[in-house]
Amino acid sequence: MPNPQKDIVKLRAEIAKHDRLYYKDATPSIDDQAYDRLKAELATLEAASPEFNFGDSPTQSVGDDRLEAFVSYTHRVPMLSLDNTYSMEELIEFGRRLEKRFPDQTLNYLVEPKIDGVAVSLTYEHGQFVRAVSRGNGAEGDDITSNVRPIAGLPTTIENAPDILEVRGEIYMRHEEFERINAIREAADQQLYANPRNLAAGTIKLLDPAEASARKLDMVLYGVGACEPARYFSHQAEIQEKLKGWGFSVLEKIWLSDGIEKAWTSIEELDTLRQDFSYPTDGAVVKLDDFRLQDEAGFTSKAPRWAIAYKFENSTTSAYKMKQASPPKPHVGRLPTNSKPNAQKLYSKKSVSRLAALEPSRPWQFSNQCNLLAPPSRARRYTTKTRSNAKTFDLVIPC
């Protein structure tokens, strides 16, 4: 016999476990899509049995990345999460709800790449950088200033700035830096890191700033939290140009779309371009452009009603992981007969060339044995060991 209370308790416990692994340990055991399915299942059960839908449910709150070793700091404006979808129909329905809310308005949407990084809030007071804080539980986060300050391109002062400004964005690690660190760990027979996002999350929470600064992190900024005076910006699209003028690293491309259908077209274009961005992306963020309309639309307990994240299914950000796995069969040609496929490592196409440049002492050699059939943005290269003229080479096979 169905027992909704038991099912809800079980799902909440499972989600809590995955929240701990993702937010606190930076070692998730499932991908985003599987995690989102768990939360969707829980939301369905809670909707059918509202008597068991308590306020502490993970469907009503954001995750919490705070650690006891760090000092907590309260955000002037909460850092909420976003509702998300993998469905075009649900994205269109999001737009239809806003059209009903604002029947006499022309609704413009800003479409931005959704970065697979670690959320950060930078506080500036009278133009001076004073603090960097993690998302935490949305209301307060960890003070990570000492680990963020060394990041290249972080403006320490900004001219003609508001009196108080919280700049929001993501910290990430480029693929070549991730692979450089893993190559060093592999040479030392240490466990490899799973992916750039987890390594970035772990790096900003290191207690030794010197150790953190030895790992190259990057940031991209795209939004604001608190801003005094309050009406310094009137539209979301203004923020990009202002941040760029102040010297922040900003999104490589954004789209201002007239209506939700055109926003979908922009998302499709983003999907074709994102492989060439310097940061990993796993979807798109769609926001009402007009701040006045955002204020009227309001918020739920954990997310704004004026924004949504569209996630790409089976996002190719997974291709940036370095795996201990057999590679797929090449499209053309074959691996040398003396290679050991089960011992091969998977690298992104560009990063192997960059590794060669970073470590010129290693005898890197590129094979001409196979022709490259896949589009460059989706190409992958496989590294194996073989012997030639009594020397060991890293033989790179495109597929």
Image: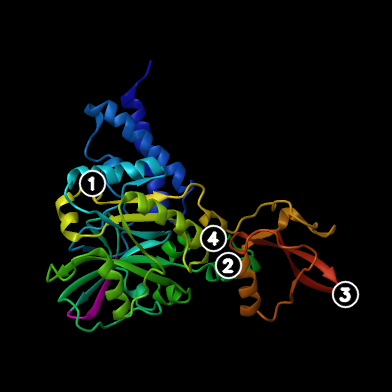
Q: Nearer the viewer, mark 3 or mark 1?
A: 1
Residue 237 picture location, percent across and down:
28, 66
Using the numbered discs, state the Cα–Cα distance from disc 1 to disc 2 in whole angstroms: 43 Å
- Which residue is the site of mark 4? 193
Viewed as shown, does residue 322 lie left or right of 85?
right
Q: Give the extent of the magenta segment.
A: 126-133
Pointers 2 and 4 in contact (C-beta within 8 Å): no
- Which residue is the site of mark 2? 179
Q: Name the residue nearer the viewer: 315 or 149.
A: 315
Q: Indicate the colouring scheme.
A: rainbow
- In what element is the residue under mark 4? loop
Q: Name the residue nearer the viewer: 335 or 61.
A: 335
Q: In the image, is residue 151 above or below residue 298?
A: below
Q: Residues within 10 Å of mark 3 (few under 14, many from 20)?
A: few
Nearest to N terminus: mark 2 or mark 4: 2
- Which residue is the site of mark 1? 98
- In what element is the residue under mark 3? loop
Q: Is residue 131 magenta?
A: yes
Nearest to N terminus: mark 3 or mark 1: 1
